Amino acid sequence: MDVNTSQFSIFVPLIIVVVNIIKKIVAVALPLLVIAIVTYGSLASSDKLPSGGFFSEIPHFDKAVHFIFYFAIVAALRFSFTVYGRSDLKTRLIIVISAVVYGGMIELLQGMYFNRSTDILDFTANSLGAVCAGFLLPQIIFNILIKKRK
């Protein structure tokens, strides 16, 4: 049975278009989902959050969680902006500063309105996570996931 590959070549441009559409949808949805999860985890009362189990025995483990939360926010936003062709230093700086300000606002809101404590060490962990994802995250990861547009 001879298969003529030229008859399938008409689908290649269609597949490329569909993949690009999916990538752009993920680029918008992923940061929104991460920010929603972090916001809920930061503002929900502690009795509504899962217990730390074994991890609650580790001193200052919550600081690692704060670091990871804000690392994830900035990494997701960097992915999104890279998909849309914005991966320059100015964009990364704006993303990191926005995440640091957001982390500060969340910490203040916790103490003022959500019956949780405001902690400068939480804010520091948030900020370090944002800075690491913004400036120290290897560019190779983004080059593998998304080819840079020139």
Image (cartoon, rainbow, N blue to C red):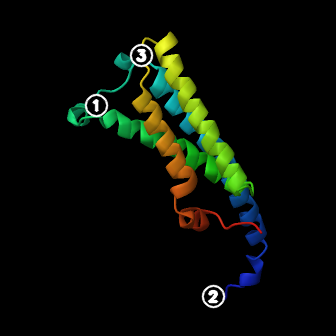
104 shown above or below 149: above
Q: Residue drawn 57% across and 64% down?
A: 139
Q: Position of residue 138 (x, y in %)?
A: 52, 63
Which disc is residue 52 wearing?
Answer: 1
**Left or right placement of residue 10 versus residue 74 in this view:** right
Cβ–Cβ below 8 Å for labels 3 and 2?
A: no
Q: Residue drawn 54% across and 31% down?
A: 103
Q: Along the line of sight, which residue is nearer the eye, 114 or 13?
A: 114
- Between marks 1 and 2, how big is the CA–CA gap? 60 Å
Cβ–Cβ below 8 Å for labels 1 and 2?
A: no
Q: Along the line of sight, which residue is nearer the eye, 45 or 104?
A: 104
Give the amino acid type for the residue marked by disc 2 in the picture. Met
Q: Along the line of sight, which residue is nearer the eye, 135 or 56?
A: 135
Which disc is residue 1 wearing?
Answer: 2
> Disc 1 or disc 2, which is closer to the eye?
1
Give the amino acid type for the residue marked by disc 3 in the picture. Arg
Q: How many marks?
A: 3
150 shown above or below 78: below
Chain-order first, disc 1 or disc 3: 1
Give the amino acid type for the residue marked by disc 1 in the picture. Gly
- Between marks 1 and 3, how big is the CA–CA gap? 17 Å
Asked which secondary structure carries label 1, the reply is: loop
Q: Disc 3 marks which residue?
A: 116
Task: Quadrant for the N terminus, please.
Answer: bottom right
